[in-house]
Image (tube, rainbow, N blue to C red):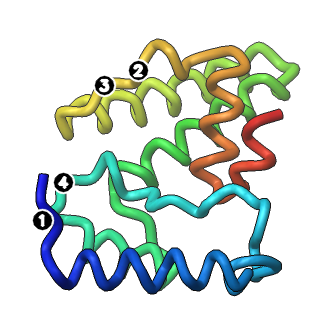
């Protein structure tokens, strides 16, 4: 495949910079790349979601999912049977709201280590924290 002239010039400049060592000791060198976390969001919604995230807001679906996880944590800590029953009702209501939005809870994330890694990722943990 033929390279365009601009591509060829850019490639030459990059290779010359590499030979001179200009890419050594850059900030973040040797650390994982911070990849775009918006891959699962449709392209036409990414800008809006990014604006919401930067403003400290979560989209309704993610907010519901976070609340579900918080209620699940409360359920695990509850000791009294009556308290557990009330928390289970709240959890069921939240899951129904999520289902009404056309989103089901993925069974892979219901329990286990995968679920914990995913929760840390959604909570903003770094990729180094997630890799265990």
Please give the residue where the numbered disc 2 appears in the rendered image: 106
Q: Distance from label 2 to label 3 (Cα)?
A: 6 Å
13 versus 73 height, above or below: below
Q: Say whether marks 2 and 4 touch (CB < 8 Å).
A: no
Q: Nearer the viewer, residue 79 or 114?
A: 114
Q: Nearer the viewer, residue 79 or 58?
A: 58
Q: Residue at x 34, y 51 (%)?
A: 39
Q: Distance from label 2 to label 1 (Cα)?
A: 24 Å
Q: Nearer the viewer, residue 129 or 67?
A: 129
Please give the residue where the numbered disc 1 appears in the rendered image: 44
Foreground disc of the pair 3, 1: 1
Q: Distance from label 4 to label 3 (Cα)?
A: 18 Å
- The quadrant the C terminus occupies is top right
Q: Distance from label 4 to label 1 (Cα)?
A: 6 Å
Q: Residue at x 59, y 84 (%)?
A: 17
Q: Distance from label 3 to label 1 (Cα)?
A: 22 Å
**44 left or right of 51 in image:** left
Quadrant for residue 32, please give it: bottom right
**100 left or right of 86 in image:** left
**114 left or right of 91 in image:** right
62 versus 78 height, above or below: below
Please give the residue where the numbered disc 4 appears in the rendered image: 42
Badge 2 element: loop
Please give the residue where the numbered disc 3 appears in the rendered image: 104
């Amino acid at each position: 495949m033929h390279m365009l002239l601009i591509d060829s010039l850019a490639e030459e400049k990059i290779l010359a910079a590499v030979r001179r060592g200009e890419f050594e000791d850059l900030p973040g060198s040797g650390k994982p790349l911070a990849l775009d976390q918006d891959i699962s969001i449709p392209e036409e919604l990414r800008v809006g979601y990014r604006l919401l995230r930067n403003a400290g807001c979560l989209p309704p679906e993610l907010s519901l999912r976070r609340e579900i996880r918080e209620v699940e944590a409360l359920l695990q800590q509850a000791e009294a049977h009556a308290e557990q029953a009330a928390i289970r009702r709240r959890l069921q209501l939240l899951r129904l709201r999520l289902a009404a939005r056309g989103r089901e809870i993925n069974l892979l994330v219901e329990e286990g280590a995968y679920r914990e890694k995913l929760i840390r990722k959604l909570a903003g943990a770094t990729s180094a924290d997630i890799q265990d």
